[in-house]
Image: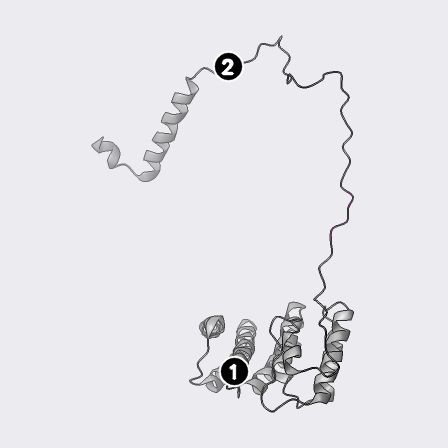
Amino acid sequence: MKRMAHRPVWIRALAVVSGVTLVTSTIPVATASPSVAMTSPSEDPNKKEQAIRPNQTPPSSRPLPPKPAFSASPSDLELRQARVFEEPLVPIGRATTAAENSALARAIDTYVQRGGGEDVSPLERFLADYPETPWRGSLLTDLGIVYRRTGYFSKALAAWEGAWTASNVATDRISNAIADRALAELAELNSRLGRADRLVSLFSEIGSRDIHGSAAERVSQAGKDWR
């Protein structure tokens, strides 16, 4: 037994497997007589086999985002609860106006009616009409996510640059989470594209900012990847 203990692990494992194989190979296995029919007592040998019908039901398509229900004069809370994108829409900075809230609600309705895919033109038009809207930071963060998922990396970078600029002045917890997400996406994509100069300036902008959750891990990893 001492000699076995000093052998490499893979040799001992092979010996065990070989021993098991030897034991099992000596156990007699009952075999059916060739003259005995291997049928179940409940089976009727005269019953014809039923035809197998293939499942021709088409697969269900990707579900559309839920259509939000807005009031005649949508509030900030209504727009925030319209979870059409990954991140909630949150106003950052100044107070919103009734006109821009109504315009944003119409843009969201149109986007959802068109399928909620990569055609974000209704939301792009809203930003063009209201370039200084406090919804800009969170909306650009979400648009950047759509752009990257659909392969438009340059548009994603531009969106997250705008989102970071518009949201890095946030002071409340929810708005800070939006800024952190935009920052993490921006740092990660710049790192993957090898844009070292922008990463250097971006980390300078971050300074001593307290980044929370998974965003902190992604920003840190982006810094490690390009070094």
Tag 1: amino acid: Asp
Observer able to see residue 72 = yes
Residue at 76% in and 79% down: 106
Would you say the magenta stretch is mainly helix, strand or loop? loop
Residue indicated by mark 1: 197
Task: Give the magenta part as a residue range.
Answer: 56-60
- Residue 133, position as x, y percentages in the image: 66, 88
Picture quadrant of residue 189: bottom right
Look at the image and tell me in which quarter the N terminus lies: top left
> Do callouts 2 and 1 mark residues in contact (Cβ within 8 Å)?
no
Residue 134 to residue 16: above or below? below
- Label whose residue precedes the other's in the sequence (2 or 1): 2
Residue at 72% in and 64% down: 64
Residue at 62% in and 90% down: 95
**How many other residues sit within 10 Å of disc 1, few (<14), some (14-19) or many (≥20)?**
few
Q: How many labels does the image show?
A: 2
Mark 1, secondary structure of its residue = helix
Tag 2: amino acid: Ala
Residue at 67% in and 82% down: 75
Marks 2 and 1, how far apart at CA: 75 Å
Tag of residue 30 = 2
Mark 2, secondary structure of its residue = loop
- Residue 42, position as x, y percentages in the image: 66, 19
Does 184 appear in magenta? Answer: no
